Amino acid sequence: QVGEAVPASQRGSWTSFLKSIASFSGDLSSMTAPPFILSPVSLTEFPAYWCERPELFAAIADAKSDEDRALAVLKWFISTLKGQYTSRNDTMGSEKKPLNPVLGELFYGMWPDKGGRGQTDLLVEQVSHHPPITAYVIENKAKGLKLVGHNAQKTSFSGGSIIVKQIGHAILTVKNLSASSASGAPPVTEYLITLPRLRIDGLWYGSPYIELCETSYIVGGGFVSTVEYKGKGYFSGKSHSFKATVSPAPGAPGREHVVEGLWHTTSKFVKGGVSGKGDFHDVNGPKEEVTVVAGGGDGAPEGEMGEFETRKLWRLVAKGIREGDFESASREKGRIENEQRQRRRDEVAAGTSWALKHFTPIASDPVYERLGALAKIQPPTEDAYVFLDNWPKTAPVSGA
Ligand code: HCR
């Protein structure tokens, strides 16, 4: 008998869903799941998790040395994990299956300037539907910070859990806004950020949750940070444990630092640290959700979203899921999917293909290759999506 969290009327379909994923590997997002596990949020909204503590992102620019900056980048990164991997449990009771974005879907947002931290902008585009790939950029121009990345997933099933290999990476660029060309300081410093593997547990009980596993890296600015993730029964015997080692890159000067703790709460330095401070990160305090803005594409008036903007595109599906009206949610979802199939057929007939708005694909990313080699990251090369630097003129959403 499956867990209590599964409504009695959906236990059969939940068991069939689990059976089908047990013999499946690849793109889970396209599989039909029972209504209780559906989220009204599209995957295009997920890159916002990178900046729900905008002051920590901005602090990267204020670091005084390469060593301080490596620690500031790590602190911001670790502080994003709670939102990225536990927030659906907090807001919806368990991990859920997000809406599978359509090709060309767009999501724009921002975090306003507060206390001199500068405004941070977010732009997301679904750059592939099969397999689903989401590209994003997060930029704080006042602070000279830009994060560009893309994300896809390959899923498999093992020991009753879904294993999600994240494919993709992010590059953080920090512009040296104060250095003159005579100072010898590099005009920009780049950091390669790789992503952890996930294990989705609790499936049988109908209340999935995520544990992070294996290792991810942050490489750049003369330092390599290696983050090892463990669940219950490892370093501290607690869920969501991690240990991060920040070491000078081969041949670079600097001290080694080691941080240990729980990524969804707090961590401490166990080696190194800055001026006697033992504490490292703390995400018990409030976070700041993104303010959604309208990009006004496809001739939509200022303040209104274009047809492909996430919150407009999925409005009726999300409403149906939120209100428990799954019939209308599935009817609207079917309508969107049929429209997409028709577009693809029309493109084939016309000999054209969908033109991305904000990104262009490259088969291998030279920054990934150069920085990845410093930590022997595998694979040695990866594809990427280059941002075209064409921020649209966005406006607050009318009536919001
Ligand atoms: C695996 C996942 C889709 C991808 C989601 C990603 C990896 C997307 C990038 C974000 O930065 C971080 C992130 C967090 C999510 O936890 C992860 C999703 C969890 C579930 C979902 C599957 C496609 C759906 C599985 C269906 C289950 C819940 C039954």
Image (cartoon, helix red, strand yellow):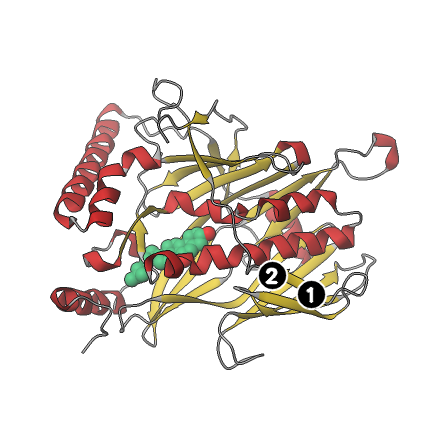
**Is 270 positioned to the left or the right of 240 in the image?**
right
Q: Residue at x 35, y 32 (%)?
A: 309
Q: Quadrant of ligand 1?
A: bottom left
In the displayed orientation, state which residue is furthest to the right. Answer: 182
* Residue contact at pointers 1 and 2, CB within 8 angstroms: yes
**Residue 5 x/y as whole percent:** 24, 69
Q: Residue at x 15, y 48 (%)?
A: 325
Residue 33 visible in image:
no
Up-down relation of residue 275 to residue 205 (above or below): above
Give residue 282's mark: 2
- Total numbered labels placed on residues in the image: 2
**Residue 185 x/y as whole percent:** 82, 39
Pick whichever, 370 or 329, lies toward us: 329
What is the three-letter code of the residue carrying label 2? Asp
Q: Residue at x 38, y 39 (%)?
A: 126
What is the three-letter code of the residue carrying label 1? Asp
Give residue 322's mark: none
User: Cα distance, mark 1 to mark 2?
Assistant: 8 Å
Residue that badge 1 annotates: 279
Pick whichever, 307 or 224, lies toward us: 307
Up-down relation of residue 281 to residue 337 (above or below): below
Q: Residue at x 81, y 61 (%)?
A: 275
Which quarter shows the N terminus?
bottom left
**Residue 319 x/y as whole percent:** 23, 43
Q: Secondary structure at mark 1?
A: strand
Up-down relation of residue 176 to residue 287 (above or below): above
Q: Secondary structure at mark 2?
A: strand
